[in-house]
Amino acid sequence: AGRKFGFDETTTDSDRIFSDERSDAGVISTRHDSHAHFVLQALKAGKHVFVEKPLCLTLDELAEIEGAYIDALTPALSQGEREYRGEAFSPGGGEGIDYAGTRPLLMVGFNRRFSPLVQKMKALLAGVKGPKSFVMTVNAGAIPADHWTQDPEIGGGRIIGEACHFIDLLRYLADHPITAYSQSG
């Protein structure tokens, strides 16, 4: 990634990256099972973070990342905002973003929302009032069962490692927080 995007310096020493005061951001493009560790390290060092998807593999990692992110924002938040920890920090909401760059930004690399065709779809859907319903069919190629992405502990499996793109895309197009309803018989 460093060569491809022309970074001044690349290294495999994460301590060096996140302790270097010359850098204000980190790009995490490592294997899925290391994302949470590096995101936490970067947030605790006060760095902006771009992490390739998935953000993490487990709910425990997600809770830890959320806590670290809220802690990084805490100096600038009111008590009510600190306690709320809800929609103000939801993906795509924008309300919790510090555009001046004084607090760390965290972005997950869901790239499909930025494609020209998706941008056109988003513009066309902007005029639709009320709930939107979507059906998406995905025809993904086969990945061998022994491939690292199929291992739930290393790659997260197909849903976490790949279907997350489509979940993010539909969430983006719907322009509404995800809600879930379930019922058992």
Image (cartoon, rainbow, N blue to C red):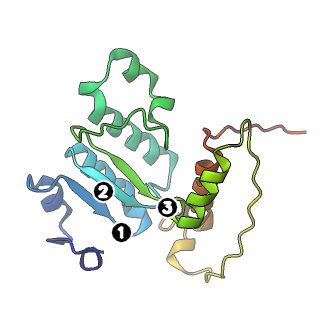
Nearer to the camera, 163 or 15? 163
Q: Residues under labels 2 and 1: Cα distance?
A: 9 Å
**Could you tell me if residue 164 is visible in this image?**
no
Q: Residue at x 46, y 30 (%)?
A: 88
**Amino acid of disc 2:** Phe
Residue 8 versus residue 79 in the image, above or below: below
Q: Which residue is mark 3?
A: 114
- Quarter of the image for residue 102 reads top left
- Report crowding for label 3: few under 14, some 14 to 19, many 20 or more residues within 10 A (C-alpha): few
Q: Residue at x 57, y 72 (%)?
A: 150
Marks 3 and 1, how far apart in space?
Answer: 22 Å
Which-is-in-front pick, marks 2 and 3? 3
Residue 157 position within the rendered picture, expressed as x and y whole percent measured from the top left: 58, 66
- The residue under label 1 is 30
Position in image of residue 99 (x %, y %): 29, 40
- Marks 2/1 in contact by CB < 8 Å: the verdict is yes
Examine the rendering and report whether any part of residue 185 can be seen: yes
Front-most of 24 and 114? Answer: 114
The CA span between labels 2 and 3 is 25 Å
Residue pointed to by mark 2: 38
Residues 119 and 138: in front is 119
Asked which secondary structure carries label 3, the reply is helix
